[in-house]
Amino acid sequence: MQIFSGMQRSRNDQSPLIWLFTAFAFFGYEALCMRYLFLPPMFGVLFFLYIRALDQRQGVAFAAVVVMLLVAESAKGYLLLSTLFVFTLGYFVVLPWFKSTVSCKQCLNAFIVTYAYVGYYVIILLFSQMFALAVPHIDYRILFYIAIEFFLIGLL
């Protein structure tokens, strides 16, 4: 007589463990990013994973991406939850418009990475003007980061 037969854990669903290990690996990677400036902060890849988690309705993946965004924000000294706001705005407002006008998958990936960096700075610049905050400064390395992350997203 099995009372709790529906309560068994599926051994095929290892998604929470994979995301846990991914988050821990990202923490180590962010520590290296603070030391070595040629390593990109992975905002484009995180935006890509954010979009994938929301499209596939994966709560564990979404939570892991949010935690990784918070770690990246604190490592770079950005405003708390600013990337989450920018990515949510991009997902619900900008991305549907872009998807309806462009059908090329590579173009969409390039747009995702570019929006993650350039869109973030445009919106933070708008916030800095509205709330009298320090104006963010755009570094030349962003073009290098965009190029690297475009190739990384092509591998995902």
Image (tube, rainbow, N blue to C red):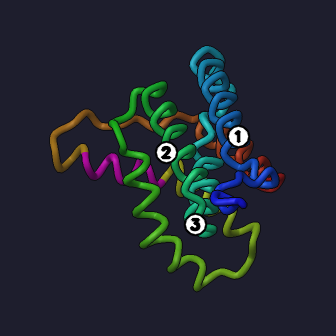
In the rendering, which numbered label is found on residue 57?
A: 3
The answer to whether residue 153 is left or right of residue 96 is right
Labels 3 and 2 touching (C-beta < 8 A): no
- Packing grade of label 2 (10 A; few <14, some 14-19, many >=20) is some
Amino acid type for the residue under numbered disc 3: Arg
The answer to whether residue 69 is left or right of residue 131 is right
- The earlier-in-sequence mark between 1 and 3 is 1
Q: Name the residue under label 2.
A: 66
Q: Distance between the residues labelled 1 and 3?
A: 17 Å
Q: Which residue lies furthest to the bottom in this view?
A: 100
Q: Residue at x 66, y 45 (%)?
A: 16
Per the image, label 2 sits on a secondary structure element best described as helix
- Where, quadrant-wise, is the N terminus in this rendering? bottom right
Q: Is residue 46 above or below residue 59?
A: above
- The span picked out in magenta is 119-127
Q: Mark 1 points at which residue?
A: 17
Q: Which residue is drawn at 56% across and 76% down?
A: 98
Residue 150 spot, x, y in % from top left: 73, 52
In the rendering, which numbered label is found on residue 142?
A: none
Nearer to us of marks 1 and 2 is 1
Nearer to us of marks 3 and 2 is 3
Q: In which quarter of the image is residue 145?
A: top right
Per the image, label 1 sits on a secondary structure element best described as helix
Q: Residue at x 45, y 36 (%)?
A: 70
Q: Distance between the residues labelled 1 and 2?
A: 16 Å
Q: Residue at x 25, y 49 (%)?
A: 127
Q: In this view, does 88 lie above or below 30?
A: below
Amino acid type for the residue under numbered disc 2: Val
Residue 137 spot, x, y in % from top left: 40, 35
